[in-house]
Image (cartoon, rainbow, N blue to C red):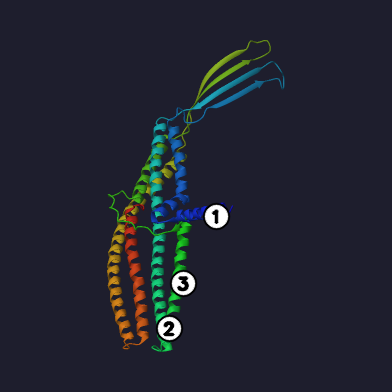
Amino acid sequence: MRVAVLRGVLAGVAAAVAVAGASAADLREGFAAAAALSAPLRTLEAERAVLLARRERAASLLPGGASVTLGYRTNQVLRDHGLREYEGEVGVPLWLPGEARALRGAAEAQLAALETSIARERLAVAGEVRADWWAWRDAAAVRDAARTRLTQARALERDLARRVAGGLTPEADRLAATAAVREAEAALRAAELALRQAAVTFRSLTGREPSDGAPEAEAAPPRDGADPRAVAARATVEAGRAAERLVQVRDRLNPEMALQLRHERDAFGEPWGTRLAVLFTIPLGSPPLQRERMAAAQAITTAGSAAAIVADRSVEGGVARAREAQDAAASVLRSTEARHAALAGQTALYEAAWRGGELPLIEVIRARAALAEADAARLRAGVAVGRAASDLNQAFGVEPR
């Protein structure tokens, strides 16, 4: 019994660990999770079925469903002379000339525009995930530097406690070291809070806990005009033009052909007669309504053309800014690494001088504080370099891979 219980507990623990591990996500996994949760993306993907059905309708024999009309006429309510009439009619709508081809072209253009809109929305989701994941990495770098600072401060405090106990150092030095420890503890708590908040932001977007992962490698620049934002704008223009062609063809309602069968007699004693008729309904156009529909279709084309110009300029400017930021991040990293190395050497010299009685402890504490700040700046600069490559990929219109 105990063995079975123990096995059940261990199995539960293993399952919990597996679930916890599965809930963590790096940048690429976080993007996939966020894309699956994105309401705008799911809405766009749901529209695909509508457009596929519209394209399928364009290939059908009729533009709509048939209609059935049944009628009965008699004079028996007033003076019944035996008038009886039974009528049945089946009507079917007919395509306007060129309407099926124009409808198919419009549906295909809308499908192409939808696919590009999905790609553009996925890129927007990628930008949000990138921003949140790198913000978490930045907060983690600050937390790591704060931990290192606290570890060193506690080591100094322990060393001073031993020296005070041996009568080698005054109590004031130990108190100064204790104050440095408390300051480092406060800094670590603040850094951990910022890290938890960054994790909450990432989890709200992706439904997953952030985890470390390999940073993105810089992608190859896409060919001109291949950015999803520019492609989506141009596809909107084509969809607008296809809508204009459809409006030109649909200048009136669909005509209708009806087959009518009538079985009747005029009075009692007269023979029944059966008549078959073929009827055509030819609707007339409405110029005001046609102008309204054409204006609506042209508005889509105009908006898409303006958006295409803006998208091309925006993409070009975004790539230029991302490259500048990448160069600046690399330069800052080199500077912060050099500064950290210089302060590390200075701190080592200050500590040696203090242990030799040539320098007061307060100078060592100040040097360590400066070194801790430089360490945090160095770690954050390393994160900024990775973030710059990720931002450049975003400017290229490339999803995390």
| CA distance for labels 1 and 3 | 37 Å
Label 3 packing within 10 angstroms: few (<14), some (14-19), many (20+): some
Q: Earlier in the sequence, mark 3 or mark 2?
A: 2
The one of 381 and 345 positioned closer to us in this rendering: 345
The kind of secondary structure element at disc 3 is: helix
Residue 230 at what x, y percent from top left? 34, 50
Query: What's the residue at 36%, 75% (across, down)?
Result: 372
Q: Amino acid at mark 3?
A: Arg
Q: Amino acid at mark 1?
A: Leu
Q: Which residue is mark 2?
A: 161
Classify residue 167 by image quadrant.
bottom left
The kind of secondary structure element at disc 2 is: helix
Q: Does the CB distance between marks 3 and 2 fall below 8 Å?
A: no
| CA distance for labels 3 and 2 | 24 Å
Residue 217 vertical position relative to residue 142 in the rendered view, above or below: above
Say whether residue 124 is visible. no
Q: Amino acid at mark 2?
A: Ala
The kind of secondary structure element at disc 1 is: helix
Residue 143 vertical position relative to residue 351 in the rendered view, above or below: above
Classify residue 360 by image quadrant.
bottom left
Q: Earlier in the sequence, mark 2 or mark 1?
A: 1
The one of 337 and 150 positioned closer to us in this rendering: 150
Query: What's the residue at 36%, 43% (across, down)?
Result: 238
Query: What's the residue at 45%, 78% (across, down)?
Result: 182
Q: Marks 3 and 2: which is nearer the front? A: 2
Q: Which residue is mark 1?
A: 6
Q: Which residue is mark 3?
A: 189
